[in-house]
Image (spheres, rainbow, N blue to C red):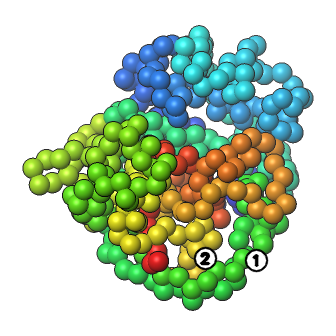
Amino acid sequence: MNFSFRTATPNEIAGALQDAREYTLDLVECYVAEGLEAAGRMPELPHVNPPLWELGHIAWFAEWFILREAISSPPSNPQRASLLTRGDDWFDPRAVPHDARRVLALPSKGALKTYCHEVLDRVLDKLGRARNDDAALYPYRLTLAYEDMRAEAMAQGLQTLNIAAPQQLAQRPMPSWAQGEIRFPGGTIELGSKPGSGFVFDNEKWAHPVHVPTFEMDSTLVSNAQFGEFVDDGGYQNPQFWSDAGRAWLMAMDRSAPRDWIRDSRRWRGMRFGTQVTLAPDEPVRHLSLYEAQAYCMWAGRRLPTETEWEYAVQSGHPALRWGDLWEWTCTPFEPYPGFAPDALREYSQSAFTSHQSVRGASFATRLRLRSPKFRNFCLPGREDMFIGFRTCAL
């Protein structure tokens, strides 16, 4: 499905919603196969939800914004009650804190799948009668994007827990690219999205001119081999490469190499969805915190790109620039654009401003229809469970 969800037609949305649900169910079954279906079996992980809660929540989200016609996320009042008597009690994330979800007594997997099918059938029926304009299709596009984002989070959970992934994800190769450096002349760009360009997340509003000075940036992400040189040179033991926050993170995590890296004679090996593999030298290094990326840059005499530089580079269309293999750290804190106002999913962006870091691009686990140079992801500096890497710029 090679189209953007942002401008998808009703027919495209209908097909994509069915595709997204099939993939969600495949991911859930990966967790269930490991015995993580019952309450209390899921390990306590800060960014991974229990599989049945995730499944019910995704359907509840679609029901809330489309079938129940809520104008915004809770505590706004929807026009109709949930198909489940206790739907809001179980699946409203405001009502059920993250730590409580793993011990919540939920309906059986069969009952939740029935709920999911019923919601999807009603959504598709209603979509078939919707106007083909941005306002009418907004809740459908939002719901599609949300399920795709939750699917990537579930894929990250499989990697974190060393669980085998669905075939379409586990067997997707990570390309290795020869790295070069690109000099960009700089100038003024329109940062953010313009009105009338289809679906727009609130943190992309609105396009505004920003001047970008001349800069030089890597054409690809830092590789395993490059980061391995930093590790072998004692990069994790040398405090001069680490910020104060980075040193505190390093002490708390007790790391001497990236997560999942395992020394095997002279080679590095790593975990990929429960399977140990030899790390390809030219493959982009993944699962790094912002602090590790910053430390590498200090060691290498480089720096991370700003969010604006990243978007400028991608907008340039330079044929040597590669992006989309992994999410990419920038050196820019995640902050609102001028005139920001929250959209229907009110807590999506504003709860993360200033505390999170801007992350750009996409990963191999991001659905193609979700990818966009305008998409602003965001992440706490210490997270490294995401499919995330980085590229560098000249000082």
Label 2 neighbourhood size at 10 Å, few (<14), some (14-19), many (20+)?
many
How far from the left and from the top, in percent, is residue 158? 41, 36
How far from the left and from the top, in percent, is residue 105? 59, 10
Label 1 neighbourhood size at 10 Å, few (<14), some (14-19), many (20+)?
few
**In the rendered view, does 269 fall on the left or right side of 319?**
left
Question: Is residue 128 at all visible to an observer of this figure?
Answer: no
Q: Which mark is residue 153?
A: none
Q: Secondary structure at mark 1?
A: strand
Q: Nearer the viewer, residue 73 or 300?
A: 300
Question: Is residue 285 at all visible to an observer of this figure?
Answer: yes
Q: Is residue 391 above or below residue 238?
A: below
Query: What residue lies at 53% left-to-right and 82% top-to-bottom?
Result: 215
**In the rendered view, does 382 fall on the left or right side of 136?**
left
Q: Nearer the viewer, residue 346 or 243?
A: 243
Pointer 1: what residue?
209
Three-letter amino acid code of the residue under disc 2: Tyr
Three-letter amino acid code of the residue under disc 1: Pro
**In the rendered view, does 279 fall on the left or right side of 103?**
left
Q: Is residue 178 above or below residue 21?
A: below
Query: What residue lies at 44% left-to-right and 60% top-to-bottom?
Result: 294
Residue 111's quadrant in the figure? Answer: top right
Query: What residue lies at 74% left-to-right and 46% top-to-bottom?
Result: 350
Pointer 2: what residue?
312
Residue 274's quadrant in the figure? Answer: top left
